[in-house]
Amino acid sequence: MDYICFIDGITSCGFSTPGQEAIYEFTPTTTGTHNLQITAAAGVFIDYFYKVAGTCDETGWTCIGDLNSVATVSFGPLTAGTTYWILLDSETATAISHTWQINCPAPPPLACGETSDPYCYSTANTLEAVSTNICPNASSDIITLTFLQGVVEDTYDELYVYSGATGTSSDPQVPLTNYSINSYYGTAGDLTGLTVTAINPGDCVSVYVNTDDLVNCSDSVYNPIIFSVACPACPDLSSAAPMVEITNSTCSTVGGTPSGGSINAPATPCPSGSSIQYSLTNNGMDWSASSPAYDQDGPAQTVYTRCLCGLDGSTASPASSLATVPGTCPVPALHLVLPTLALAIMTSLPIMRL
């Protein structure tokens, strides 16, 4: 409690408040609608009000609600850096007790290259948003979170990171329409150095702490959670991939077997962030990081290459192709042997008498 002003007669919540009031000072760090959460109550109504800090009198107070049980009520919006007074005034003159807290709104979604504000989680016993709907710049980008510091209660207060194609749903227990990447305690509760990567390119991620009602960041003097957002992208793969280097087989021995043919990686590498792949069909099914074996004596092969993004297995360059020309061995010389034709010519000449 910060002030006692002995203010009476404030009825903007619709009821008289004869009890002694208490005024608390609060300076939000985030602009937006805040939540006043009653975590324990004795069953008697206390009226809650707020206004910008200034003159401690009956004017200018806005009703947050008249509450007598565990509840959460939204109020504001409040402006970051502006000091406000929170007034509690009982509807009875007897002593009563409430336990309450103000929960700040989740900060605006972080962008690629930004670092989160420090976040110190409470004992809300619920899934408490640290930062939600962190989305990449492009559908081919994949988000990586690196936790620079932060401590959670080991084995009890888990860090949750969700990954999905859309933002938060109406069910706070299912922050994204996809599913959680995992829950984490870091090293015995210390999150420093933890890295978490989204499941798919283009996924948004949200960060939560699943708290219990016993230990919180502030009371335990834990380091607040701080993390950075990186969105590495695929390189420009709009150009065709470099072609393989082919050495064709040769043969100089009569009746021999061609040899010496090889299929080698392109002389020019793929862009940084991608890798070369090979195929003999270019049908999308048999791409491999290993070059195919050269068929030394044929038939000819057409070797396709593409550059595949290391972050996204569905993003690749246009394919290039080059065919092999296997060598052939010389054949033996052809010797034509003609059979000898013996002709017996018998000539019968008449005997001429002189």
Image: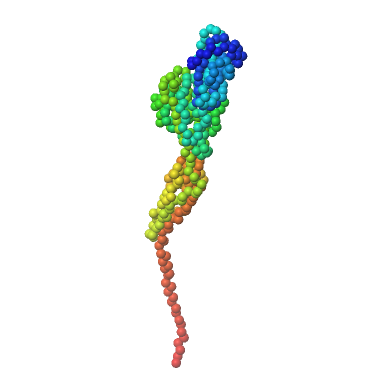
Residue 161, position in %: x, y? Answer: 48, 29
| Residue 61 location, quadrant | top right
Front one among 45 and 178: 45
Q: Residue at x 44, y 44 (%)?
A: 272
**Vertically, is 72 above or below 93?**
below
Front one among 8 and 86: 8
Q: Residue furthest left?
A: 253
Q: Residue furthest top?
A: 94
Front one among 226 and 199: 226
Residue 350, position in %: x, y? Answer: 46, 86
**Vertically, is 97 above or below 52?**
above
- State the scheme by which the image is colored: rainbow
Q: Is residue 57 left or right of residue 252?
A: right
Q: Residue at x 52, y 30 (%)?
A: 108
Q: Residue furthest front?
A: 55
Front one among 269 and 324: 269
Number of callouts? 0
Q: Residue at x 40, y 57 (%)?
A: 250
Residue 292, position in %: x, y? Answer: 43, 48
Q: Residue at x 42, y 72 (%)?
A: 340
Q: Residue furthest bottom?
A: 354
Residue 293, position in %: x, y? Answer: 42, 49
Of the 4 image quadrants, the one containing the C terminus is: bottom left
Would residue 185 be seen by someone viewing this image from the given angle?
Answer: no
Would residue 97 be seen by someone viewing this image from the given angle?
Answer: yes
